[in-house]
Image: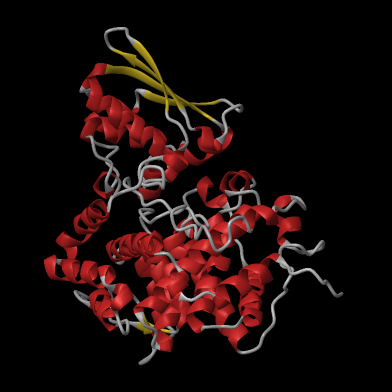
Amino acid sequence: MTHTEESLTERLASHWADLSFDEIPGEVVDRVKDNILDTLAVALAGVHTEEAQRVRAALTSVQQTESGSLVWGTPFLLPPSHAALANGTSTHARDFDDGGGPGHAGSTVLPAALAVAETTGADGRALIAATIAGYDIGYRTLQALGGFAAHTDRGWHSSGTMGSLAAAAAGAKALGLDAARFADALGIAGSFTGGVWAFIDDGAWTKRIHPGKAGETGVDAALLARAGITGPRRIFEAEWGGLFALYNGGRGYAEKALHELGVDFNVATAYIKPYACCRGSHSTIDTVLSLIQERNVKPEDVRHISITAGDTAVNMLSVDPIETVFDAQFSLPYAVTVALNNRSVGLDQFDPPRIDEPGIRETFQKISMHVDSGIQLEDGPRLDVEFMDGETLTLLAGNPTTAKGSAQNPLSHAEVVGKAEALLLAPYGPKVTHDLVHAVENLENAPDLSELLRALRAGTRGE
């Protein structure tokens, strides 16, 4: 069947295949470097989690190569697609990586971009351009399906679904594919993409692996396209078997996906997390921390907090009992509990969970969650706070996607560096931390990726 009108993937591929680094605004480059630093710092912090170790064991038990792509924080080299799988898992292992784009942008895009860029001898500018391509196309393809909330409401995990296309875009840009092969890469990735929220039912580790698996799919798609394998150009529009039909009941929003193409690069859509838990909790955490700051509220001042949210938010954020890191990160009552008790919501509050501490348990038992089907995911929860003195207070948390770390309330570069230092200084020391920050800050001037890779390899302990 012949179609005269360019498909969505052909439009996106044509734009990005022809775009040079010099056409990307400097403020976009600066912004994505913060996301790159955040992604790599979070990845190194996740290297020795059990999930990341088990994925690496599965891969290195059957293959290691003397030439290949680096598995960050280790001495191992693997084929590029498997390096992307391992590194994406490390990055997302503690859910502290950036979000937005295709769901979790950095952990899907950067492992793919860097794994491929290593094999081509790319310079820093090429890696930055490939990363931005992934962020932009990942976000746009998710908009084509109605956006994050609509896609999530259907039970799809966008980091796994559109993350695969984001990773394919990054790989295709790193390889320098022409428009036709670039479109093939997107079509191939779309043919094998997937990821569902079933893990929320029992805390399965697939949640941690989805970004890495998306990276693996995207790298393979780009390499296959370079070799001449074709992908369906109408991967979204095909009436039978297309993603609009399969993922969105036949409805598509190509016009949203193409809005301001080449003007808005959609890096700013990817928030950087200040809190080490599901983004759906962040506007509520902002609200609670503001209340604490304004009124010096202590746990013993509170009789009860009732959190009312929509169906999707309650499904995502009411995990109970709290037994694992995953459980804690997907419990909004637990996040509010640690905010009240410690006035901080860093990784140390979740890994390991503190629920068995008497003070934490006592506060946790004061908090309840309730469903109001009229509240949408992006409306954010309502908090009804009852104090011990009888006062009651109602607070509207607002949209989680505009919480601290978003484009509307971004972290400064100093705050991003501070987060990286908090994650890396204790396990890796000041030299590794400094070297990584320096390599990323100067990435657009790097003639190759050797300085960055040294920083990612430094401090390895072997396995």
Quadrant position of the C terminus in the picture: bottom left
At 40% across and 36% down in the image, what residue appears? 283
Picture quadrant of residue 334: top left
At 35% across and 53% down in the image, what residue appears? 96
Q: Is residue 297 above or below residue 118?
A: above
Left/right placement of residue 379 relative to residue 145 reads left
Looking at the picture, tell me which residue is in the foreground, 30 or 411.
Answer: 30
- Residue 341: where, in percent of width, then height? 23, 31
Left/right placement of residue 137 relative to residue 324 reads right
What colour-coding does the image apply?
Answer: secondary structure
Q: Residue furthest bottom?
A: 66
At 40% across and 59% down in the image, what residue appears? 92
- Residue 194: where, in percent of width, then height? 61, 62
- Residue 100: where, in percent of width, then height? 48, 53
Q: Residue furthest right?
A: 1
Looking at the picture, tell me which residue is in the foreground, 95 or 233.
Answer: 233
Quadrant position of the N terminus in the picture: bottom right
Q: Is residue 376 above or below residue 242?
A: above
Looking at the picture, tell me which residue is in the foreground, 348 or 150.
Answer: 150
Picture quadrant of residue 372: top right
**Numbered-mark total:** 0
Q: Residue furthest top?
A: 390
Picture quadrant of residue 42: bottom left
Residue 178 in sight from this viewpoint? yes
- Residue 81: where, in percent of width, then height? 48, 78
At 30% across and 44% down in the image, what residue appears? 353
Residue 85 in sight from this viewpoint? no
